[in-house]
Amino acid sequence: HAILSNRLAAARPSATGAVSELARRLAAEGRSIISLSEGELDFDTPAHIQYAAIKGIIGGQTRYTSVGGTPALKAAIQRKFRDDNDLDYQPSEIIAATGAKQLLFNALLATLNQGDEALVIAPFWVSYTEMVQIADGTPVVITPPAGDHFKLTPDLLAAHITPNTRWLILNAPCNPSGALYSREELAALADVVRKHPRILVLSDDIYEKILYEGSFTSFAQAAPDLKDRVLTINGVSKSHAMTGWRLGYAGGPAWLIKGMELLQSQSTSNPSSVSQAAATAALDGPQEFLDDWRDRLRVRRDTALSILAQTPLLSISRPPAAFYLFADCGKAIGLRTPQGQVIGSDLDLARYLLEEAGVAVVPGTAFGLAPYLRLAFALSDERLKLACERIVAACGQLA
Ligand code: PLP
């Protein structure tokens, strides 16, 4: 009787979650563990957003709402897209959900049939390929060269398109590489997409606000004529330190939004009413705190890079956005630990760093590219410094 569906046969649990789990277990055993594996800011949700949620609770915003979000939240999202991204979405073209994750899942489930392909650019956020598979689609992974942060080029894109291609999944700023595309680069990709009317583009903009250099352009903004084939996904998790509130939002063609809403209506219904009240305040309220957050994150990025430069085993390019370092650890492969074990892969190196140095990182394998390590730098300066020093020392013990 214990047989899971075919749908789940190929799906893997979140690899980032597995590392965090092992780190928690070692910490529970009393070990000093510093986690560089979490994909979230250590900052608190700003106070005005907390108060909006409390006000929402006391004011009775504690009941079911429209499946796709309250009118107030949709108005805030509409404004956000217009002011930040030059994108004009009507309320029927907007949906809020329980995190960007649910939007991605519902969009893929609503559109993929067996045999349909979704293009995913490596290194990629761990869930894209798994979600495509669960939705009966086939992930087609494109791996651009490492130079220039693994950015997709028009030629590479064109070479991977087949009659079965249904989605191009773009994520910029990218988790894990930090890649950021200019308006011109997006326009050049759009030139390829334009030639293939069946292809939809999913633009995962969740790290839009975590930017150290350059400026952000959303895909539909760079190719306004393709707007009806683009799903623009965003959320408050990373922009307002609200990962636990579970609130994401999307703009797209009404037919697609309707399909996603149908799925949502038969599964989870509306995202939490309290989180909607909070997210409305987040989008409508002051955004100045972000400058301070960015400054602090930039310092952390540069501190981590300068400490990690002391080990020749890691080679890291400076990410222009997001809060991750994606480190090439190829020089560590084949070396031996003081106990004589061979580091055969980035998984081995991640385990060694966790067990020997007490630092949790995620192996690049989880993001479809080895041998690499992803190190999140969204934690306090002191702990980040200590973690990087421990990594350098542990790498120094490999021979
Ligand atoms: N997209 C990317 C690229 C992410 O890194 C994450 C979270 O780590 C998500 C989407 C999911 O965000 P949410 O918390 O809104 O579900």
Image (cartoon, rainbow, N blue to C red):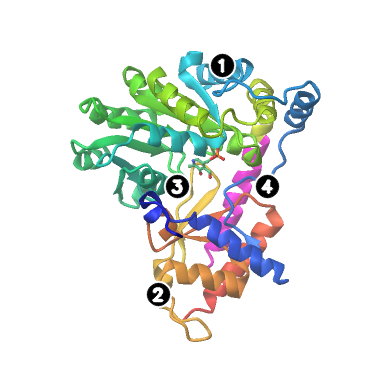
Q: Distance between the residues labelled 2 and 1?
A: 51 Å
Instruction: Tell me, for residue 127, which label it has, or none.
Output: 3
Instruction: Tell me, for residue 42, which label it has, or none.
Output: 4
Instruction: Tell me if mark 4 has few (under 14), some (14-19) or many (20+) residues whose alpha carbon lies within 10 angstroms of its own.
Output: few
The image shows residue 241 at horizontal and vertical percentages of 65, 39
Residue 217 visible at all: no
Disc 3: residue Cβ within 8 A of ligand 1's nearest atom: yes
Which residue lies under the disc numbered 1? 79
Q: Nearer the viewer, mark 3 or mark 1?
A: 3
Counting residues from the N terminus, which is met first, the one under dot 3 or under dot 1? 1
Instruction: Tell me, for residue 344, which label it has, or none.
Output: 2
Disc 2: residue Cβ within 8 A of ligand 1's nearest atom: no
Residue 46 visible at all: yes
Q: Which amino acid does label 4 sit on?
A: Asp
Q: What residue type is labelled 1?
A: Arg
Q: Are marks 3 and 1 in contact (CB under 8 Å)?
A: no
Counting residues from the N terminus, which is met first, the one under dot 3 or under dot 4? 4
